[in-house]
Image (cartoon, rainbow, N blue to C red):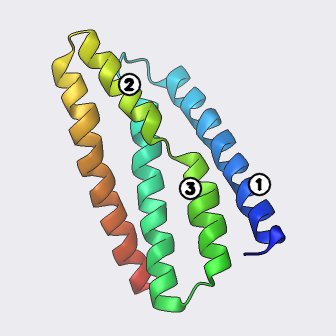
């Protein structure tokens, strides 16, 4: 692993984190619900994109450096498992058990389906 690759992954992670912050802010401003909708959208779209990158890598030999920059860097910074976990616990503490169940289990199911769709589409391209 070269120093340039480490810097590229770090920079891509920063861009992904900023993208997450901006998208979450836009969604919160436009969709007024007491459910962590932004985090769900971010994790599902990030899973789709990681599936797509993986599918493209498998089908077309995307170089490992690009996989690291896009997958580990950008999408690692963009998606957020820890925030989703925290929000699920917070919903349960508020006794909003259905919302907590959907946030925990529903997001996982949606994210897995999105990753599978991305993988499939990436391999078709």
The residue indicated by pointer 2 is: 87
Disc with the residue nearer the chain's start (2 vs 3): 3
- Could you say where residue 10 lies in the image, as x and y percent from the top left? 73, 55
- The circle on residue 75 is 3
As drawn, the label of residue 80 is none
- Circles 2 and 1: CB distance less than 8 Å? no
Q: Position of residue 79 (x, y in %)?
A: 51, 46
> Can the viewer see residue 36?
no
* Residue plotted at (48% across, 62% down): 49
Instruction: Tell me if mark 2 has few (under 14), some (14-19) or many (20+) residues whose alpha carbon lies within 10 angstroms of its own.
Output: some
Picture layout, residue 85 above or below residue 71:
above
Q: Position of residue 111 (x, y in %)?
A: 33, 52
- Mark 2–mark 1 Cα distance, whole angstroms, equals 27 Å
Q: CA distance from mark 3 to mark 1?
A: 12 Å
Residue 79 visible, this orientation: yes
Which residue in the rendered view is the most extreme toward the bottom? Answer: 60
| Residue occupying the far right of the picture | 4
Q: Residue at x 60, y 48 (%)?
A: 77
Q: Secondary structure at mark 3?
A: helix
Tell me the number on the disc at residue 11.
1
């Amino acid at each position: 692993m070269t120093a340039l690759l480490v810097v590229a992954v770090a920079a891509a992670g920063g861009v992904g984190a900023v993208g997450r912050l901006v998208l979450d802010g836009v969604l919160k401003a436009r969709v007024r619900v007491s459910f962590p909708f932004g985090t769900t959208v971010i994790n599902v779209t990030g899973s789709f994109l990681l599936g797509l990158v993986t599918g493209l890598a498998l089908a077309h030999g995307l170089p490992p450096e690009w996989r690291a920059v896009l997958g580990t860097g950008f999408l690692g910074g963009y998606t957020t498992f820890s925030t989703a976990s925290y929000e699920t616990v917070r919903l349960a503490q508020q006794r909003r058990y259905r919302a907590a169940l959907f946030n925990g289990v529903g997001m996982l199911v949606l994210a897995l389906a999105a990753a599978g769709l991305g993988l499939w589409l990436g391999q078709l391209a």
